[in-house]
Amino acid sequence: MIELPPAVARAFVEAMRAYFAEDDPAKRGQIAVLQMHALRDHWKGKLRLHDVEAMFIEMREHLRPADQSSSQAPKRQRPQAAIKTTASTASRSNRRS
């Protein structure tokens, strides 16, 4: 684990968000390369492009967008039994018509 200055860490998070928002693979690669060069000043080992992309993926799982709060309960899905009941009721009503 490395200690990054706050400005470098914020820039890395913004770059990560831009990376995942970008559809063009070449531009995504450019974003990762720029961050790889920025991190090399603070990294004591060998740092490859794949390492930066792996960090982006891992961080995305831990960071939530600002508009989602962690206090929101996850959306509940309808139970499977209710879905089957609704489908069988609909098929019975079609047979009656």
Image: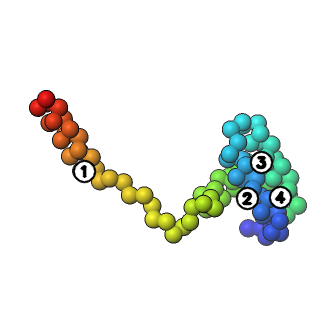
- Residue under numbered circle 1: 82
| Tag 3 near tag 2, CB within 8 Å | no
- Label 2 and label 1: CA atoms lie apart by 42 Å
Is residue 17 at all visible to an observer of this figure? Answer: yes
* Closer to us: 26 or 93: 93
> In the picture provided, is 80 more to the left or to the right than 95?
right
* Closer to us: 4 or 75: 75
- Label 4 and label 3: CA atoms lie apart by 10 Å
Of the residues shown, which amino acid type is indicated by label 2?
A: Val
Q: Residue at x 11, y 32 (%)?
A: 96
- Residue under numbered circle 3: 32
Q: Position of residue 28 (x, y in %)?
A: 74, 42
Q: Nearer the viewer, mark 1 or mark 4?
A: 1
Q: Which of marks 2 and 1 is nearer the N terminus?
A: 2
Q: Is residue 1 above or below residue 84?
A: below
Q: Which of marks 3 and 2 is nearer the N terminus?
A: 2
- Residue under numbered circle 4: 39
Q: Residue at x 17, y 32 (%)?
A: 94
Q: In which quarter of the image is the N terminus?
A: bottom right
Query: Which residue, as the protein is rendered here, is positioned at the far left?
Result: 96
